[in-house]
Image (spheres, coloured by chain):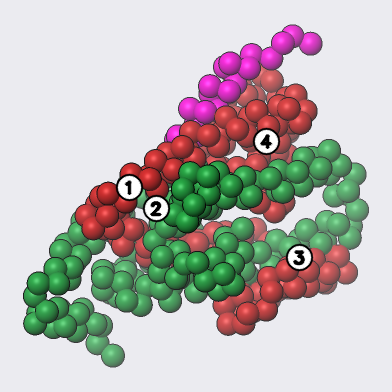
Amino acid sequence: MLPVAQRVLCEERRWLTREEFLGLLSLGQALPGPNVCNLSIMVGHRFCGWRGAGAALLGMLAVPFAVVLALAAGFGHLSAHPAVAGALRGLGAVSAGLVAGTALKLAGALRATPLGRPAALALGVAAFGLVALARLPLPWVLLMLGPPAWWLATRRLAVTAPPAAPATAPATAAAEEPPP
Amino acid sequence: MTPLPWLTVLSGVAGLSLLSVGGALTVAPELHRLLVGELALLSDAQFRAAVALAQSAPGPNALYTAILGWQLAGAGGAALVLTAFMAPSSALALAVARWGGRLEGRGVRALRTGLAPITVALVASTAWLLAARAGGPAPLAVTAAAALLAWRTRLHLLWILGAGALLGSLGLV
């Protein structure tokens, strides 16, 4: 789901930059509900108001809803077939790869993060360790890492945001660059 | 068959919607407790089949709630339960999209910036967990090839998915 959304929104239609996509996905992640659905609601709203949001959500759910019901009705005897079971295994392996490819692309959007690369790397490694390796539930991880990340972002944005001080802005940006 | 306690089911599902931070599956244990334990409307096997099916099918994992509804009362039940699950969280997302913009430059922008690296890590974690579930060297090789193709080329994703399904149905994965 996510790889397709990223591909279509950022590369085929060019409605969002990678950075904007990552920002909206982050918000969608922090809100309850499926992150891709939240993302599509916010994208739909951005371009066409509440009608766009409704259309985006329906578009996201309608076809999968029909497919899932058809599968639920006929899945029992279909999945017993070795070729079907094999195809599902193959699809599973590929979709893991597509999601990994999306993670790599989105990581590119962090290059210019106001957090600074070392801090962003530390937050990312911590989140991966807690979710993928320690298998902690996501709400806990967001509660642990979210507040410090927010605090840091607020401070960094306060330093870089005011355009009133152009003399210091390049210096701060340079200072935040990690050593080569 | 006794009439289903729809009010209890739908209000329970709608309430869990607002707690489902991190995706629909995070509230699966709670939903299991309600439908299988407390109300005894579904069996444990039915519940697990719904989750497994939604995970292997295309579309958001939240569709497992639709399968639970289908198991309760056919297509109408599926639409009702899915709507009850999607409406509250979607309304909240819409509210944030609509009024969150006024806070732009302060809270929301910092939240997005701060969460961005965590979000990338979560996407990577999803890939990691999916790959671990597939297991074995052949699926891992397919996963790595798909990752490289999706990352570095503009090859249409359906070709990559189709190739995976073909390799799998030939018994090569």
Q: Amino acid at mark 2?
A: Leu
Q: CB of mark 2 within 8 Å of CB of mark 3?
A: no
Image coordinates of residue B165 in percent, x first then y, are 80, 66
**Marks 2 and 3, Cα distance to the nearest angstrom?**
32 Å
Q: Secondary structure at mark 2?
A: helix
Q: In the image, which is nearer the foreground, mark 3 or mark 1?
A: 1
Quarter of the image with the C terminus of chain A is: bottom left
Q: Chain of mark 3?
A: A
> Label for residue B66?
4
**Marks 2 and 1, Cα distance to the nearest angstrom?**
10 Å
Q: Amino acid at mark 3?
A: Gly
Q: Is residue B41 above or below residue B126?
A: above
Q: Colour of chain B?
A: red
> Is residue B22 shown in magenta?
yes
Q: Earlier in the sequence, mark 2 or mark 3?
A: 2
Image coordinates of residue A142 in percent, x first then y, are 36, 50
**Marks 3 and 4, Cα distance to the nearest angstrom?**
25 Å
> Label for residue A27?
2
Q: Nearer the viewer, residue A39 or A46?
A: A46
Q: Can marks 3 and 4 be said to lie on one chain? A: no
**Marks 1 and 4, Cα distance to the nearest angstrom?**
30 Å
Per the rendered image, the range of residues in magenta is B1-23
Kindly identify which residue carries mark 3: A90
Q: In the image, which is nearer the foreground, mark 1 or mark 4?
A: 1
Kindly identify which residue carries mark 1: B100
Q: Is residue B71 visible?
A: no
